[in-house]
Image (cartoon, rainbow, N blue to C red):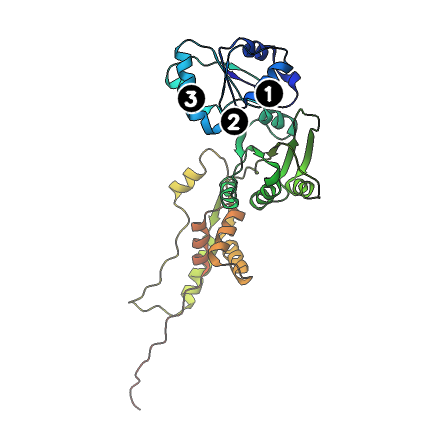
Amino acid sequence: MLCGAPIGDVRDASPRLGEVLATADVIAAEDTRRVIRLAHALGVTISGRIVSCYDAVEGARAALLTDYLRQGATVALVTDAGMPAVSDPGFRVVAAAAAAGMAITVVPGPSAVTAALAVSGLPTDRWTFEGFLPRKGADRRSLLRELGGETRTMVFLESPHRLPAGLGDLIAAFGAGRAAVLCRELTKTFEEIVRGDLAALLAWATDGRTIRGEFTLVVAGGARHRPVTVDFAPAQAAATEAAELAPPAPASSPAADPPAARGSEQAEADGAGVGPTDSVDARVLAADVARRTAAGMPRKQARRAVAADYGVSRNDVYAAELAVRAPRAAPATQVDLPPF
């Protein structure tokens, strides 16, 4: 049995949890001392065998607990708080038991993830749980870049000593104004819920206070944008006019045609089922790249930034640059004139 344990207030435990702790043949606990204290708080005595099952030993315990199940024993898996296997040990145990064909049941209980999501006031119709952000800054920033286009509400867990750095990287990825709610020590004596945007949460975390406790962070998803296409017609018309005014290019070096917009099949695939599309002039994209590079930004980085800002691909940005580029004038050809 997977047993949900209180995340703070022991009164949130169900009567069924107490019954299971009192009658199970084996209790697999993330912390054996804490499960004994939990049973005492619930007024029950554990009569079965208690074994540890924390992250470092879970793989080995999975085989042991599955053997107990094969022998007909009732096994209860309990983590320190919340539901086993949700950012806590338990996944390997469940996978091994399921692979062995063992029956698996659950004793539902509190969860910091759903509790924070419910109290956040942010959309809950669609959401994603991302767990703890990576410890290393480079890995954390890489993950957040992948989530840059996420439109669902996101739930993260964070430790006190990494909270300021994590909030800073979230701001870099999503913007300072993204709505967010920080939940600290849910259901415990010093529960605190901080609402605002990411900038406000970072200000709260860096105002000199001592940061303690466990944090669940709920971040609003990004806006759902309609697909964007690039309008090359004005730029290509200007390029055609410039080409007509320019001297003809030598036959040995024909001018390259600028790449066209994405084909109709690709455009149809990109916008399938989404509805009408927005359009941006290719000249606007090219001008924005030029403005950024003039300010000192590397061209590749400028293209990436423009693509992100306008919701188009980097290939479209590059094609826009080529489309507005005036063709080079043909080199002057020396002509031998006949003598007078």
Amino acid type of the residue that numbered disc 2 sits on in the rendered structure = Asp
Element under label 1? loop
Q: On the picture, is 315 further left or further right than 45?
A: left
Element under label 3? helix
The numbered mark at residue 110 is: 1
Can residue 1 be seen in this snapshot?
no
Q: In the rendered image of this protein, does residue 28 appear above or below residue 265?
A: above
The numbered mark at residue 88 is: 2
N-terminal label among 2 and 1: 2
Tell me where residue 282 appears, x and y as whole percent. 48, 53
Tag nearer the camera, 2 or 1: 2
The numbered mark at residue 62 is: 3
* Label 2, residues with CA under 10 Å away: few <14, some 14-19, many ≥20: some
Amino acid type of the residue that numbered disc 1 sits on in the rendered structure = Pro
Q: In the rendered image of this protein, does residue 323 appear above or below residue 60?
A: below
**Residue 252: quarter of image:** bottom left
Can residue 143 be seen in this snapshot?
yes
Q: On the picture, is 105 further left or further right than 38?
A: left
Which residue occupies the foreground of this view, 286 or 63? Answer: 63
